Amino acid sequence: MTTDTQSHTATEPVDESAIGESTDMDPAAKRKAGKAALNELLKPVKGMLTLGRALAVVSSVIAIAPYIALTRIGELLLAAYRAGAPVDSAALRSNVTLLVAAFVTQLTVYFVALGVTHFADLRLVTHLRKQILQRVSSAPLAWFSESTSGSIRKAVQDDTKTLHTLIAHAPVETTAAIATPLVLVIYAFTIDWRLGLLSLATYPIYAYLQYMMMADMGEKTAEMDTKLGEVSATGVEFAEGIEVVKGFGRTGKAHSRYAEAAERFAEFYWDWCGPLLKGSSLSMAVISVPILLFVNLGGGALMIAAGWVSVPQVLTCSLIALVVPMVIEVLGMTAWAYQLAGNSALRIVEILTTEQLATSSADQSEDAAIWAHRRYTEPVGASFENVSYAYVSDGTRIEALKNVSLELPPESITALIGASGSGKSTLATMLARFRDPDAGRVLIDGKDIRQMSEAELYRSVAFVLQDAQLMRMSIRDNIALARPDASDEEIRAVADSANILADIEALPKGFDTVVGDDTDLSGGQKQRIAIARALLADTPLLILDEATASTDPDCEAEIQAALNRLVLGRTVLVIAHHAESVIGADQICVLSSGRVDAVGTVAEVSDNAYWQRLLRDSGEEGQNNG
Ligand code: ADP
Ligand code: MG
């Protein structure tokens, strides 16, 4: 016994080859990858799921008892009726007791089984969310960058929920759905093998009809793919070439190619679906209640007439026959749940295995220690040195920043202004390494941020962006995102500073309110929660993206007050859209087409064209503000 069986933990990286890219996969490969991902995710709760299944089997076995009692009761009554004598009340009572007790026990065991799996679900979901959030808090880049924030949110909010059916319900329900009918049919056979056969009589027909339908499914599905491909190809052709085609006055012709392909597809689809639907309803009919009753009671009556079986036996076996279709229904439903859950598991695993930013000294274990004493005692400055950056999308280069240099002195507020598309967001978020410059350097406290570990970087920089980026989890967790270890007192304190404490406490569930689930928060409330989060993160550097339009005039003042508290003592880079918010800044940087157009104090940039325009526009907007 020297070999140690390999044990995995959930945090261990998953076999990537089995998972790979979730997009552009053929369905079979995707299903397989989903299954692999699912197995990996379920590992931590495997024991509990097995226990749930075992209990479901126990409950299924107990399920025979009521049928046994039922048959006996029937026989007692029948015997009494035939003999014209009173019923043996002691025997009747004991059988009724058995019936009730067995029924109650069976249900109890079943619910305990469900309880076990629900507990497993709760544990796993909490565990997964924590893991995802840890990932997010140590790599905000992945969270905030536009391309992935959607999938991460989906993973936290929806995917962990999709897993619920699979973990909390499927193990018990599928096991019971198979075990109960199986055990009961076996019991039917023990009553009388002919009755047992009768209870399954219609299934060969059902299986045959299903088989006929599925037989050419693979081929037809492939054909459908081709035909669909044809439709979309000609559709694209039609759309792309529309100007050319129009120019040459041949609209009708190009369009007819598309219309023909679409028509061919529709015809094919109907040819395929029609018989399929008919076959499907026919096969469902042979296992429907009326047919089952007809076959079992009818066949049973003949057997009674032949003297093979008793009336109660036929009734019991007919009841059993009605339970069997449950297998098909539940299995169909779970197959679907598995497919969905597979896709969810893939997304979750993808996030948990996402590459983090390459850093020189990144070390995960370092995180906790750093958070513990992360408060900077000295203000920290930052600077951009000859930074250039180009987005490349679909082969075209968009030069967003061209040789930008900007100094952010410690504890200063720098307002970044410029026309839409001038590069403000690109420049500001570069400070948090949303992307690295193609040329040039970004320094924090004189250190190239590429030389910093993630933990070091994110204890230096926090951001409050326009879209407040709240996730579907409790307000407490939303605030504690950057510091999951924060105490309740700390969270209350920052909520208070962010002017949101009263609003949160007014909610029925307070800090436990789940954003988006229990309540809809206003834009201003969300923003103040984001501010509370940044306050808790307590970083010396701050990136702010001022809202373009005031979300809600009533709380504008409260937001402003919260922001004022947030920026206090920090080095701030704010993307500003209003002249008023720029006035208080220590310096203004005007960007124009990715270049620094002007930089300096309000007085120094006073003759900059964009600044004058902003001033004029704000003046019109805020007439009554003076
Ligand atoms: P601003 O914040 O000043 O509006 P941005 O920094 O968002 O400007 O954008 C600067 C330029 O980069 C714009 O031309 C914009 O179209 C382009 N750009 C921004 N984000 C992307 C992206 N993800 N992919 C491609 N181009 C982008
Ligand atoms: Mg922007």
Image: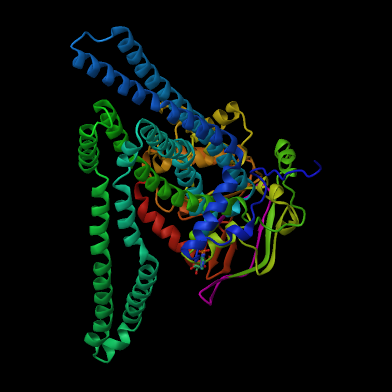
Give the prevailing secondary structure in the magenta stretch: strand
As drawn, the residue found furthest toward the front would be: 306
Residue at the spot x=30%, y=45% of the render?
Answer: 201
* On screen, residue 62 above or below 402: above
Residue at the spot x=51%, y=32% of the render?
Answer: 52
- Side of 525 where 442 appears, left or right: right
Is residue 512 at least partly visible in the picture? no
As drawn, the residue found furthest toward the bottom would be: 248
Across and down, in percent, residue 616 comes to 41, 59
Residue at the spot x=55%, y=38% of the render?
Answer: 124
Across and down, in percent, residue 33 comes to 55, 57
* On screen, residue 253 above or below 133: below
Q: Does the magenta portion include 612?
A: no
Return the residue nearer the eye: 419 or 126: 126
Residues shaded magenta:
391-415
- Side of 127 where 335 appears, left or right: left
Residue at the spot x=38%, y=33% of the render?
Answer: 184
- Side of 264 where 164 appears, left or right: right
Across and down, in percent, residue 109 comes to 46, 25
Return the residue nearer the eye: 552 or 481: 481
Is residue 262 at least partly visible in the picture? yes
Q: Does the magenta portion include 406?
A: yes
Return the residue nearer the eye: 165 or 536: 165
